Image: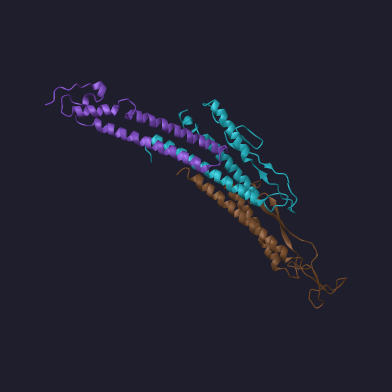
Chain colours: A brown, B purple, C cyan
Amino acid sequence: MFGSLDISTSALVAQRTRMDVIAGNIANAYSTQRLDGQPGPYKRRFAVFATGNPAAATPAAPGVHVEAVEEDPAPGRLVYDPQHPDAIRTGPQAGYVEYPNVDLATEMVDAIEAARAYEANITAMDVTKSMISASLRLLA
Amino acid sequence: MAGPIDFDPARSGMGPIAPAGAPGAAALRRSATAAEGAEGGTSFKNILLDSLDQVNRLQQEASQGVERLATGQTANVAEVFTAVRKADVAFSLLMEMRNKLMEAYQEIRQMQV
Amino acid sequence: MVFANLVGRETLPVLEKALAFAEARHRVLTENIANVDTPGYRTKHLDAAAFQEALGQALARRKEDPSGALELPSSREFHEDASGHLVVTPTEEPPENILFHDGTNGKLERQMAMLAENALMHRAMVELTRNRFDILMAAIRGRTA
C-alpha cells in the first residue's frame, strides 16, 4: 500500500521536472544566445519519461522518472536584422538572426497536459491515503 | 379465611417459592398459569428460543449479502450494509436479554427466603 | 483449531481475499496513472470481474464441503502462493488506438474512474471486516460495547 504512495510521488516529481523544462522554454523563447557559450540560439528542451524509479529503495520498483532532458535540434525562426549583435555574419543566411524553435502555443498545451497529469496523481495519492486510513481503523 | 388450596407445583412451575395456604397463593397460581400459557406457545422460554432462531436467520442473510457483494452479484452496498446492521442489532438485543436474565437470576438466588 | 474456526469461517475469508485483490488492483491503477505521459507505455490491467467470478466459484465449492477452507482457483492474472498470499500478474493491454502520438494507449479518465470504484469496494470490504471483528469481540466479552 505504501508502494502506491511511492509510485504517485515519482510521477509528481517527474511532472514537476517537466513543468520546469517548459517554464525554461517559455522564459527563453527569445534568447538568441546559449548558456554554454556555443554559437546559436537557445534550443527548445523537452523531458523524456521512462518507467522505473531509480530514487526508490529498489530501482526496479514501478513508477516513472525523467530519463533525460533532450534538446530539440529543429531549426529556429530566421528574422532578417543585420544590426542585431547575434546576426549571422557569413553564408547564405548572412544578416539573419536565428531565434529559438520555441512555439509558445505548443509549450502552453504541454504545460496544461503536465498540470492535468499532476492533478491526477494527487488524486491517486488522496485515494491511497484514505484507503490506508480505513485499513488502520480495523484495529480501533 | 382461605382453606387449603389445591396447589400443584408441577403445573404452576413456581416450585418451593410459593408458600401453600397464603392468601396470595391463588393470585400467584393464576399468574403462574398465565406465564406458561394455555396453549404453551407464548412462554418466556419460547420467546427466547424464537429470538435465537430469528437472530440466526438474520445473520445468515447478512453473510449471504456480504458474499454477494464480494463476488459482484450485487452492487447495492446500502442493502448489504443494512442487512448486516439489522443482524448486529438483533444480536445485541438478544445478548442484552441474556445478560438481564442472568442478573435477574443472580438477584433471585441471593434473596433471603 | 479453536481459533482457526473462529476467524476462518463464514464471511471473514471472503472479505480478506477481496481486500487483498482490491489493494493489488489499486497499485496497478496507480502505476498506470503515474505513467500517463511515458511514451510507449502499455497500461496494465487486473480484471475485477474475473476475480469476483473466481471468488464465487470458491464459495460454491465451500458450500459443498463446509469444513474446508476457502480456496481461490488460480487464473492467469492471480493465484495464491503457499502461505495464502495473493500474487497478481497484470496483463498489458494492447494498443487499441493510434490517437496518441507518443504511442501510449492509456485513457486517464478511465483509469481515474476505475481507481475510484476500486477504492469504494476496498472501503466497503474494510468496514465489513471491522464489523465482523467487532461482533466477534462483543460475543466473546458477553457485552454489547
Left or right of C140, for residue C106: right
Residue plotted at (51% across, 37% down): B66
Spot occupied by residue C30 in the image (x, y as percentages of width and height): 62, 48
Spot occupied by residue C97 in the image (x, y as percentages of width and height): 74, 49
On-image quarter of the C terminus of chain A = top left
Left or right of B29, for residue A6: right
Residue plotted at (58% across, 52% down): A125
Left or right of B60, for residue C100: right
Which image quadrant for residue B86?
top left
Q: Is residue A129 above or below residue C145?
A: below
Residue A29 in sight here: yes
Which image quadrant for residue B6?
top left
Which image quadrant for residue B12?
top left
Residue farthest to the right?
A92
Residue C82 in sight here: no
Number of residue marks: 0
Residue farthest to the front?
B38
Residue plotted at (29% across, 27% down): B36
Q: Is residue B15 above or below residue A32?
A: above
Q: Is residue C20 above or below residue C38?
A: above
**Residue nearer the viewer, B82 or A48:** B82
